[in-house]
Amino acid sequence: MNLILLSGGSGKRLWPLSNDVRSKQFIKFFDDGKGNRESMVQRMYHAIERVDSDANVTIATSKSQISELRNQLGDNIQISLEPCRRDTFPAIALAVCYLHDVEHISEEDSVVVCPVDPYVEDDYFEALKKLYELSQEGKANLTLLGMEPTYPSSKYGYIIPKGKDNISKVSMFKEKPSEEVAKTYIDQGALWNGGIFAFKIGYLLRKAHELIDFKDYQDLFSKYETLEKISFDYAVAEKEDSIQVMRFKGTWVDLGSWNTLTDALGEGSNIGNTLLSEDCKHDHIVNELDIPILCVGVSDVIVAASPEGVLVTNREGSSHIKDYVEKLNTPVMFAEKSWGEYKVIDVTAESITRKIALSKGHHMSYHLHKRRKEVWNIIAGEGSVIIDGVKKHVKAGDVINIDIGKKHTIIAESEHLQIIEVQIGKNIDVGDKVKYDLSKEALEASL
């Protein structure tokens, strides 16, 4: 089975755990059964490996998410890189061209496309395999997976099938309705539209060439910024006559708000350093800080804390936080990178202090700064610092001074190499960073 996972977007609805860099699919909410926490994308990817170990998985994503994806899934994942955000149709077209032109997948083979971040169980992946098989049969150009509604929701679009059989032709699509109208749709056998499609690669290539002037994958990639922002539903699905839908009655939850997330996590699923009094009822606490959160005598509240800020809300109010978060103007205080992660622990007018953790065998990019110098305090682990091509072994207790204009990186040689980094200068921002290639010889000598 060929599978394209759409990993896009940044999140405000799960603030302060999600932000412009860290999307909801990367937050580690879920117990992996081994005493560790895993994210939505890890949960999805590992389930695919478990249900169909031969699945050919490609993740369509933007450059800003590649570091987090590799941090959480490893360096060997297959990625279709979107040069910029252009909605789901351009993203799918680019990924399909990648499969055909770069991975040399036949036009007669099918592909299933789905979001990376719903909360699902193994029966969902069995349904994806069935969707792939239906597409291979070729009875319809486009095969959708529709979710049996559990309530009349105004949050989802609806697929109206021509019948109530397990597999039916599609009559029409309806946009997000009022709850009252949604009830009438459900009475007709309507299904939630979860954005899950299957089609033959040749079909989508033809559609892409009808709507976009391009030659091949490389040409489409180079023109990507000029493409119209348009969803797959609008560009393809709603105009297709040869289209069918398969019903899915299993677990499928869009974890787009604190309400739906806490429902999925269930009672007693508080995360991090938390303490609640015995009279607290139906509370959900997620704490990513190194300090404790204590709740006494409160019920039906959600508390979330990260370096970005602290949220305190009742369940009803949690669905309305986005408008308030938009008013906040704060820098990104936490990020996962391909080499590890960092947290900002202090900001002044002319300095930023970060706590950095690198994974063994990984290194930062080799780079310099034009407007700031840095001081690295090694607080745990061992590694090698390279400054202007000169390598030096470092360990806990060492202090490294890096002047403006000096190329530098650090390579972790032990688990959990940790650094307190102090950036000193004016107008500190990402534009102050210039990256260079680090020679293979220098890396191999340091590992």
Image (tube, helix red, strand yellow):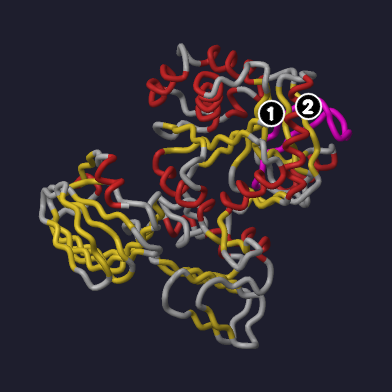
Q: Is residue 170 above or below residue 415?
A: above
Start-end of magenta stretch? 155-174
| Residue 446 in picture, x, y percent from top left | 28, 52
Amino acid type at circle 1 is Ala
Amino acid type at circle 2 is Leu
Which of the 4 image quadrants contains residue 418?
bottom left
| Residue 105 in picture, x, y percent from top left | 60, 21
Mark 2 and 1 residues: CB-CB less than 8 Å, in contact? yes
Residue 286 is inside the magenta segment: no
Q: Is residue 238 above or below residue 58?
A: above
Towards the viewer: 282 or 72: 72
Q: Residue at x 43, y 67 (%)?
A: 306
Q: Residue at x 56, y 30 (%)?
A: 231
SS for dot 1: strand
Disc 1 target residue: 198
Towards the viewer: 384 or 113: 384
Towards the viewer: 436 or 66: 436
Which of the 4 image quadrants contains residue 393?
bottom left
Determine if residue 181 is in view.
no
| Residue 179 in picture, x, y percent from top left | 72, 48
SS for dot 2: helix
Residues at marks 2 and 1, CA–CA distance in whole angstroms = 8 Å
User: Which dot marks residue 23?
Assistant: none
10 Å neighbourhood of mark 1: few (<14), some, or many (≥20)? many
Closer to the N terminus: mark 2 or mark 1?
2
Q: Residue at x 66, y 24 (%)?
A: 238
Q: Residue at x 14, y 55 (%)?
A: 372
Disc 2 target residue: 134
Towards the viewer: 262 or 178: 262
Number of numbered markers: 2
